[in-house]
Amino acid sequence: MAELQQVLELLQQLTAKQDALAEELKQQQHTCTCGNHSSSISEQGVTHYPNATPPHSPIAHTGGIDALRASRKNSMSSLNGLSTSPLTTARNFLTGLTSTDGVNGNGNGAVTPGTPYGNLSLDAAARGAGAPGGLLPPEKNETDEKKGKGLYPSRVILTTYPTQHGINPTPLNWGAATARERGPVVCSRIKSNLLIRNAIGAHAGSYSIYRALSIGMGQLRPDWRPDLTNTHPPFVLPPTQGWFGNKIVSFDPWGAMSQEIWAKEYAEGLDVRPTISQTKAHIKIQELDELFKKGDFPCDGDIVIKSPELPAFPGVDQGIEVNTYKAAIDPVWHLPGVAERLGIAESTLRRALFEDTGGMYPELLTRPDIKTFLPPIGGMTVYIMGDPAKLQDPETEVTCRPHDSCAGSDVFGSDICTCRPYLIFGIAEALKCAQRGGVGVIIYFQKEGRALGEVVKYMVYNRRKRGGDSAAEYFNNTEVVAGVKDARHQALMPDVLHFLGIKHIHNLISMSNMKYDAIIGSGITVGNRYEIPEELIPADGKVEIDAKIQAGYFSKKQMTDDLVKETKGRNWGMSTTIVISIYLLTRFAEDIVH
């Protein structure tokens, strides 16, 4: 009975609050001289853009008590049948936390014009606003409150719309002839940048998530901006014809120069950051030491230099290392260009990116005026051996290996594929090309497991090894686990070649027909194609390479259906100790059951 009495009291308070709000809405209608949904109600913790114009809701809003009660009725119907107490339900309505089309609670009992995604305070979001079921008060934690206080404004901005007052994206004309004409890429939401941002997403690709964790833990301020002094590239990759038009759609070709081009604007508060970083480096790989000892290439003191002695191994020759220039590139997608390259509609691309990432970026749907997206994925690293400036000269010999990452082989030497030996072969050919006066280029794309990921890749390995590991079933084993054979979408791969100014590749160190077709399809010509030498293929890697040759990879080797069926991988072996252990465990389990 006590709880029922509380419910009645809460309902009486709700009635009084509704009447008061209805009177305010009536007054607002009389004072409003425009046809939009702007509100004159001042709310604590809710940031309004002056004269904001939210998109039209599917439900017509006539104002007054009828609209308010209709919205409450809709909210009530969404809660029917749920296991919540009358007291909880009444409290939810009184605090105004249930979001409906056009009328949203801000956690303080005030009602504001809304959007389909709602204008929820952090308090409301913490209590599950917008979700079906009863909403419970948050559990207060003073330490957490103090730690999180001041990190963000109390109002959660889930998305924006082009029609909102104050929204004025910085002009960005993809493919323009100069950086100034093109404009900066601005994706930051800090301070006033939210109103002028012209890109969806966040900087740093997949590492943007770790940045968010650092902010949440109080290790980094949300509005922190880097000091870009002395971060400019030590070598120049000048603009080439490929920078203009639609040759590059998957990253920003001006991304390494932003700290110079936009220095004045950055100092004034425009949060434009580099998406490409260039530096110099030495690379040292054991296999290159062995090739040097065999006499495959000399130590010229320029491209190839002697490694210094290590204190841990006094008197031991440490071999050689290779002088390189390198560039790290984060993805910046021009959505219309990416869609065209993939052969789909831009609207389909946006919908897929929204739906199949758990709705991570609502602005993909609500901001069709923004054409640029920084996806939370890995980018690529370019290694250049020789003079980078010579890449634009069509007479310069260019040796290139485009390589997709494979941590298992590239880093840890797994022998189930040919990735590392083919990569080392490509690096060796690239440095020899540089020693001949040409330029060697290695492009390392972050596309682990054919861009299906390492978890999927290892599951495919398990299926292969338990099913006989035949080259004839190589691609089928991937498809039944992942749904597709390959998700690398090589149509975007040649962008980096145009960025470097490459027009002709004299030596392509790749057997992939998909990469080759993408390269020549983009207007770059190819001279020689090199397959991995037979003597470099690991025993357990023959399944992969024979299956790929059968599927269309370049090779002088004639592959038939019968040969593919004969190519088998190594089976998992089980020692006598393991077999006995399994037998004893089985008997032990049987004894327990009986």
Image (spheres, helix red, strand yellow):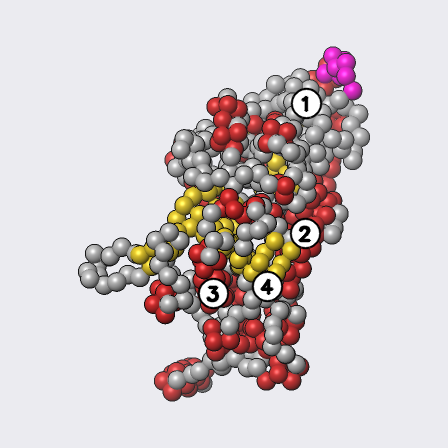
Within 10 Å of disc 1 (Cα), the crowding (few <14, some 14-19, many 20+) is: some
Mark 3 → mark 4, Cα distance in angstroms = 15 Å
Residue drawn at (31%, 56%) of the image: 306
Q: Which is more foreground, mark 3 or mark 1? A: 3
In the displayed structure, would residue 570 be above or below residue 173?
below
Q: Is residue 256 visible in this depiction of the protein?
A: yes
Q: How far from the left and from the top, in percent, is residue 153?
A: 52, 28
426 or 386: which is nearer to us? 386
Quarter-wise, where is residue 180 in the image? top right
- Kindly identify the amino acid type of the residue bearing the numbered disc 4: Asn
- Which type of secondary structure does the marked residue at label 2 adopt? loop
Q: Is residue 201 visible in this depiction of the protein?
A: no
Mark 2 vs mark 4: which is more N-terminal? 2
In the image, the segment drawn in magenta is 28-35
According to the picture, the residue beneath numbered tag 3 turns out to be 425
In the displayed structure, would residue 468 be above or below residue 386?
below
Q: How far from the left and from the top, in percent, is residue 395?
A: 57, 51
379 or 283: which is nearer to us? 283
Quarter-wise, where is residue 310 in the image? bottom left
According to the picture, the residue beneath numbered tag 1 turns out to be 165
Q: Which is more foreground, mark 3 or mark 4? A: 4
- Kindly identify the amino acid type of the residue bearing the numbered disc 3: Phe
What residue occupies the far top of the structure in this picture? 31
Residue drawn at (56%, 73%) of the image: 545
